[in-house]
Image: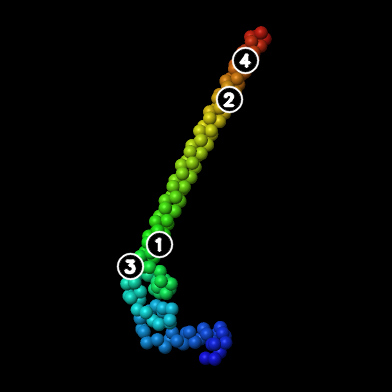
Amino acid sequence: MNQNKKGNYHNRANSYSRSRSRSNSKSPGIRDNKSRVVDKSQSDKRSGGEKFVWGKKIEEQKKKEIDPRSREEDERNKKAEMQREMEKVQNRRQVREKEQFASGQQKIKAVKVTDEEDYKKWLEQEEKFHVEQAKLRLRIFLIHLLIS
């Protein structure tokens, strides 16, 4: 055990496993901060929606002679401030989403306009092509008429 105090890692690990194997508890329990086995059902009861109270913090405040009413008021103020911060964050997110949606709509409109312009150019080119083809056919027809 003297080696444990020196900080030898392997001996600490072995002593930990030995102390775990010595426990009389057959059910899987939870170890609290003092290496005692705590019944799991008790720990579940503690977290069942009850407000957590930091006992040592309250003791420190009592030593400093802080009034419990002012402490409760501070907690309410903290909670209200956190709520305001959350609302600010939500509002910023909503504004950002609206801006992104608006910019997305603008991009879509810009793409539509350019597509329409490209389509109009393509139609003009196609029309020119057909006119040129008609002229060419007419020339060929006239040449065939003159030859025959």
Mark 2 vs mark 3, CA separation in Å: 71 Å
Mark 4 vs mark 3, CA separation in Å: 91 Å
* Quadrant, the C terminus: top right
Q: Which residue is mark 3?
A: 50
Tell me the mark number nearer the camera, choosing from 1 and 2: 1
Mark 1 vs mark 2, CA separation in Å: 70 Å
Q: Which residue is mark 2?
A: 121
Mark 1 vs mark 3, CA separation in Å: 20 Å
- Residue at x 45% of width, y 86% of height: 19
Tell me the mark number nearer the camera, choosing from 4 and 1: 1
Mark 4, Cα crowd under 10 Å, few <14 / some 14-19 / many 20+, is few
Q: Which of the 4 image quadrants contains residue 83?
A: bottom left
Q: Which residue is mark 4?
A: 135
On the image, the x and y values in percent for residue 95 come to: 46, 44
Please, what secondary structure does the residue beneath circle 3 have? loop
Tell me the mark number nearer the camera, choosing from 4 and 2: 2
On the image, the x and y values in percent for residue 112 come to: 52, 32
Residue type highlighted by circle 1:
Asp
Tell me the mark number nearer the camera, choosing from 2 and 3: 3
Mark 4 or mark 1: whose residue is earlier in sequence = 1
Mark 2, Cα crowd under 10 Å, few <14 / some 14-19 / many 20+, is few
- Residue at x 52% of width, y 91% of height: 1
Compared to 106, does 31 lie above or below? Answer: below
Mark 4 or mark 2: whose residue is earlier in sequence = 2
